Image: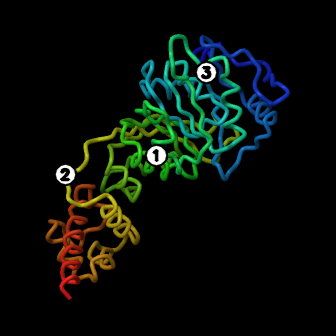
């Protein structure tokens, strides 16, 4: 049964160790229905955890839309975070991807290879098409993944840590050029927001340091088990060349955090803490070509970087003075 025709298994056969024992072959995929997901979850002793942000996709059409929107190519190395019981994993495998699935839940991480045991190796390939890593994605580094490194992140991200995961992967995995992630609709709006928008804020600006982001397809809450209280959406993120600035990322992010800590304050007031007073902040803003009476929500990432460059220059001067004393 394929993802396209949306057929499902009538039962969820499990062996004595709780592993899935149904017919899973390279040419036939599956997406489990809600009752089947519940049976399989019970068989492996998993209850959806709010702490892990677990909501399992059970709709074949949704999986197909995600895979098509991601434009997965055969042989592409793809990172999936939070694979759960494997519905999206299977869609990626059917598209020919080599999937690195990172799962924090030990029981689910142990189950996933059993679910796809027949499909772990493809003919004439030295690398398994599925590699499962039991790890917190926020603790994941390139050294944890055998070469080649993934070039795309395609995932139904845990709701409660979606933004930190996106920023962490963008920071650490330079080989990842594109992302297509499913997150809460509200979070999708924030990630893709442009300067001047009511929802433009810290996530929007920090993602813009690395990449461009746009809101893609809406996803109904009813394609998940258990059904969440909110709808979801896909966000497409494309890495761009590094900004031409003398300021390091850490300092730019320090400026962003300060600018949005109290959104209603002018930048002159909001940045006073990091520039040694409102007067220092005003001088730095004028030097950066920015109106001191502006607010953080109006600035693009290039302007935040310009302010950060002024902060770096000030810190360099202060350090030089201190060394002479």
Residue 295 in percent (x, y) is at 29, 67
Query: Which mark is in front, 1 or 2?
Result: 2
**Which circle marks residue 188 in the picture?**
1
Question: How packed is label 2: few (under 14 Cα within 10 Å), some, or many (20 or more)?
Answer: few
Question: How packed is label 1: few (under 14 Cα within 10 Å), some, or many (20 or more)?
Answer: many
Disc 2 is placed on an element classified as loop
Q: Above or below — where is 188 with respect to 312?
A: above
State yes or no: discs 3 and 2 in contact (Cβ < 8 Å): no
Quickly name the residue at label 2.
244
Closest to the observer, 225 or 142: 142
Closest to the observer, 183 or 141: 141
Q: Is residue 241 left or right of residue 203?
A: left
Q: Above or below — where is 258 with respect to 165?
A: below
Residue 150 in percent (x, y) is at 44, 33
Q: Above or below — where is 271 with respect to 222?
A: below
Quickly name the residue at label 3.
120
- Please report the residue visible at 59 percent of the width from the left and 24 percent of the height from the top: 90
Disc 3 is placed on an element classified as loop
């Amino acid at each position: 049964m394929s993802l396209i025709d949306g057929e499902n298994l009538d039962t969820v056969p499990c062996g004595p160790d709780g592993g899935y024992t149904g017919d899973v072959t390279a040419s036939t995929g599956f997406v489990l229905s809600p009752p089947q997901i519940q049976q399989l979850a019970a068989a492996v002793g998993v209850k959806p955890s709010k702490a892990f942000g677990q909501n399992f996709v059970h709709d074949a059409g949704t999986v197909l839309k995600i895979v098509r929107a991601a434009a997965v190519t055969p042989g592409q190395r793809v990172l999936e975070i939070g694979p759960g019981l494997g519905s999206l994993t299977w869609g990626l495998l059917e598209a020919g991807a080599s999937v690195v699935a990172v799962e924090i839940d030990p029981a689910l991480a142990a189950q996933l290879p059993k679910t796809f045991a027949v499909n772990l190796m493809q003919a004439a390939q030295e690398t398994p098409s599925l590699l499962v890593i039991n790890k917190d994605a926020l603790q994941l580094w390139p050294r944890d993944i055998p070469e080649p490194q993934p070039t795309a992140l395609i995932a139904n991200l845990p709701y409660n840590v979606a933004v930190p995961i996106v920023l962490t992967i963008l920071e650490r995995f330079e080989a990842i050029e594109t992302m297509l992630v499913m997150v809460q609709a509200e979070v999708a709006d924030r990630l893709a927001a442009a300067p001047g928008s009511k929802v433009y804020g810290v996530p929007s600006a920090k993602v813009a340091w690395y990449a461009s982001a746009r809101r893609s397809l809406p996803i109904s809450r009813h394609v998940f088990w258990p059904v969440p209280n909110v709808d979801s959406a896909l966000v497409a993120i494309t890495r761009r060349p590094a900004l031409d600035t003398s300021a390091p990322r850490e300092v730019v992010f320090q400026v962003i955090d300060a600018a949005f800590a109290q959104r209603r304050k002018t930048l002159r007031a909001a940045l006073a803490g990091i520039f040694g007073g409102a007067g220092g902040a005003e001088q730095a803003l004028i030097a950066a070509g920015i109106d001191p009476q502006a607010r953080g929500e109006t600035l693009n990432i290039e302007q935040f970087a310009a302010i950060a460059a002024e902060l770096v220059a000030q810190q360099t001067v202060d350090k030089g003075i201190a060394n002479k004393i």
